[in-house]
Image (cartoon, grey):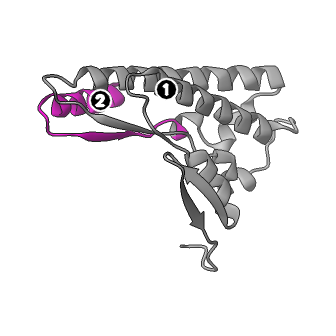
Amino acid sequence: SDLLDNQVDGLAKQIAKGAVQTAVIAIGLNDIGGAAIYDQYTSQAALRSALDARVNNITNNINAIVGRLQSASVHGRTVKLVIGNIPDATATPEYRNHIFTNGLPATTATIRAAIQKANRAIESIAHSHRGSIPVVNLFALSDLGAGAGRFTLPGDNQVSLQKTQDANN
């Protein structure tokens, strides 16, 4: 999209000037979309096809963004990139409370599987670029939203989360 291109071009210019040393790439959740858009698909094949197109678009965008930002690093000025994978949209109240009208019993599971597929591709992209880019596992964090848990960050740093009583925290 033009907006994404403008944002990436602006960031690339800042990197080339040495004004930015670290950048976080976290896109894809909006591209997965809200639950209601999937009501239009009345077969698993059509749903999977639509999700595959979305996943391909997301991963192609991330790959292009990483390439553009890394190529902006010139004259010894390098940018450190971090990529956030796609959170589990199906763990949100929008998905949990949505009654799919398409008659497909596994719509949520199919969407979740597509997000996991995108995240595997994001991991692959991160490891294929020079310097192997760290990936923050936002998908695992979204799984922890329902309760306390433990997850590992790059470098084997353990983080524990505790569920609060206040739903707003």
Q: Quadrant of the N terminus?
A: top left
Q: Position of residue 131 (x, y in %)?
A: 38, 27
Front-most of residues 165 and 21: 21
Tell me the amino acid under the disc marked 1. His
Evaluate whether residue 43 shows in this view: no
- Please identify the residue farthest to the bottom as the structure is shown: 165
Q: CA distance from mark 1 to mark 2?
A: 21 Å
In the image, residue 16 sits, relative to residue 84, either above or below, namely above
Along the horizontal axis of the image, is 95 left or right of 85? Answer: right
Residue tagged 1:
127
- Label 1 or label 2, whichever comes before in sequence order: 2
Q: Secondary structure at mark 2?
A: helix
* Residue in view at x 67 percent, y 67 percent: 148
Q: Position of residue 165 (x, y in %)?
A: 64, 80
* Residue in view at x 40 percent, y 20 percent: 64
* Residue in view at x 73 percent, y 34 percent: 113
In the image, residue 25 sits, relative to residue 2, either above or below, namely below
Span shown in magenta? 1-29
Tell me the amino acid under the disc marked 2. Val
Q: Secondary structure at mark 1?
A: helix
Q: Residues within 10 Å of mark 2 (few under 14, many from 20)?
A: some
Q: Position of residue 96 (x, y in %)?
A: 74, 54
Place residue 50 in its image quadrant: top right
Q: Residues within 10 Å of mark 1 (few under 14, many from 20)?
A: some
Place residue 68 in its image quadrant: top left
Q: Is residue 16 magenta?
A: yes
Along the horizontal axis of the image, is 36 left or right of 130? Answer: right
Q: Is residue 10 magenta?
A: yes
Residue tagged 2:
8
- Which is closer to the viewer, label 1 or label 2? 1
* Residue in view at x 58 percent, y 25 percent: 121
